[in-house]
Image (cartoon, coloured by chain):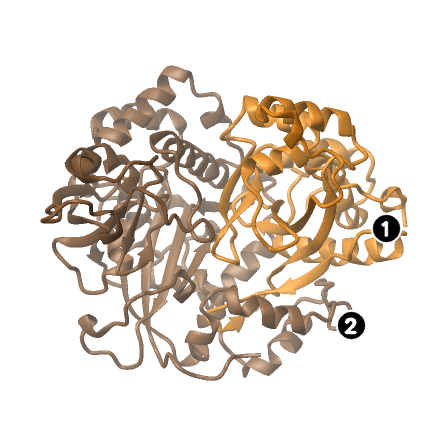
Amino acid sequence: MEMCSDEAVKYVWEGAIPLQIHLHESEVTTLPPPSPILILGPRLGYLPLLVPIIKAHFSSTLPPGTDTVWFDYKGLPLKWSIPTGVLFDLLCAEPERPWNLTVHFRGGHPGDILSPCEGEDSVKWSYINSLKEAAYIINGNCKNVMNMSQADQYDLWQSVLKGNLDGYIKISSRLKLGPFRDDSLVRPASSPAQHQQQATAEHEPTGSGKPCRIPVRLYVRNIGDDLDDLEDAPIIDSWERISYINRPFEIHKEEGGYLTLEQAVKSLLPEIFDFKPPFEDTRELKSKESPDSSLTDAEIVDTSKSVEEEQASSVAESEVHPPNRLKIKLIRVQGIELESDIPFYWVANNLKSTEFFLHMCVFLTGPTKHAKMR
Amino acid sequence: MGSSCLWNGTLSPDEFNTAATALAKRWKETDSTLPEWIWIPCQRMGVSSSNVEGYLALEKVYRHRGSEEDKADDNCSVDEELVDDDATLVCGNNDDLHAYDFHIVYSYSYRVPILYFRGYRSDGHPLSLDEIVMDLPPHSSNTLKESKWTFLTQEEHPYLNRPWYMLHPCGISDWMKLLLVDGVSNEGSKTPQYLPAWLSVIGQAVGLRIPLELHQKP
């Protein structure tokens, strides 16, 4: 398999979600209510970028006021900085076409869930900041992005905005952010998770042992126990049901073999797949394994109370089960359910998003109801 | 580990945990009137990480608008631009109590600590960006005007899944290198000194006063 596939990248860039966007009922001022608008949302695009077209459709019926535009899907406010294709892959376990979204123009903006969005500028800078982050992960600094000329920065953003792949390649290749080459491949010596742990402990990027780091954003949701049909997956009514993991994947150079997608995903989720001892013993084992870790029991400030408080608002803890009962049901990237043994570097090179992050949606199966872990 | 002259100003996750413990301990030993830094361990998918993962929290730091040590007058001058009516100027008004929560979170991408914070009124109502800007030291509110998108923005808190204000991390490793690499002769003392040094810069940006004793060698 070739490391880079122009064809795959082209498919990804052409990908779009058919959207059917409804005006929220509280903003309907006409009878009959306005019809929804059908529009193609580019997979690599962002919802606020569609607002000018959507607003033109609804503008004649909108109540007076200023715009604070946001979208929801079945009541879940949609995070605008996540590419549209990722939102679709994540929230529609069974793809829904067209995808029915609701748009809000006049208020109700859930500021505790969504960052404020001031239209294209907000999206552009969120994009640039992500690009900087990716550059830092890959090169250990963001100089290439910071030193871009205004003209290049403008052209790059325009190419993303307009889905212009040729223009994008022209500018982005100057950033020297890949491709990830097969000489940075590795076959994990033991378990991938163990390997990763080692990698983080010895990460000191001095000299030749410099690891290859790949920018990854992982969205993990548990769709329930022994679910045969994805249509039966529970509706996501809160972002707390999704574990969002923003942690680069690290590869140490080693001879031979290749790293599969499944190995990579499991190594990114050591909490779930590096599960050797019963839960209660984890910390004890940890202190035996790495004596240099200074967070021993005695030194950890007792925060059991605040932990409990945090749990109420924190990631999906209460919804999931001990990790040994969780299994990967599917890994979806750019709308594709990928084979678990596909080479990870191929996925990273060809299915990444425009800010050089690989967004992966991981669906787990396992019991969803159980007592809170302590 | 490499020698300190090659050190690039970053921390590994384990070093961050060590540094966090050291900061919480040292902070407690100072005479600070501020609350304590508390380590909040985190879980993902129902289990705690095999690496102990978490963040440091300093919560309910109260601030009377205009009573901040660093130049209350400058804070007022910010008000003048935003408020037309003099009668609504609230400088020095004791009822106008703002609370701030600060979290120090490790960034796996940048391998440095990142400061997240939020501000709210005594009734729990979140402060608007304009209100927060008025609480910021003048140099920060100026920077914010010049660099609206690359200095301080609302971003997703990595563990709480909701927007918090974040000071952008690009460049932290470079100035941490400058701050620590010369003064620290061995690797061992780099980690415990990391967060006090980091906080001496980051804290200034958000008007968080750092007890002087924090910088004294243990």
In the figure, the shade used to draw chain B is orange
| Residue in front for this viewpoint, A168 or A157 | A157
Mark 2 secondary-structure assignment: loop
Question: Measuring 49% from the left and 44% from the top, which residue is drawn there?
Answer: B155
Residue A267 found in image quarter: bottom left
Marks 2 and 1 belong to one chain: no
Mark 1 secondary-structure assignment: loop
How many tags in the picture? 2
For mark 2, what is the residue? Answer: A298
Question: Measuring 70% from the left and 27% from the top, which residue is drawn there?
Answer: B76
Instruction: Say which of marks 2 and 1 sits in front.
Output: 1
For mark 1, what is the residue? Answer: B32
Colour brown belongs to chain:
A
Label 1 amino acid?
Ser
Question: Measuring 73% from the left and 53% from the top, which residue is drawn there?
Answer: B19
Residue B147, horizontal then vertical, whole percent: 54, 25
Label 2 amino acid?
Ala
Residue A176, horizontal then vertical, whole percent: 40, 30
Q: Is residue A301 left or right of residue B107?
A: right
Residue A4, horizontal then vertical, whole percent: 25, 41
| Residue in front for this viewpoint, A343 or B55 | B55
| Residue in front for this viewpoint, A9 or A192 | A9
- When the figure is inspected, residue B118 is found, relative to residue A266, above or below; the finding is above
The chain that hosts pointer 1 is B
Q: Is residue A101 visible?
A: yes
Callout 2: few (<14), some (14-19), or many (20+) C-alpha neighbours within 10 Å? few
Q: Is residue A358 left or right of residue B202?
A: left
Q: Is residue A11 left or right of residue A279?
A: left
| Residue in front for this viewpoint, B94 or B28 | B94
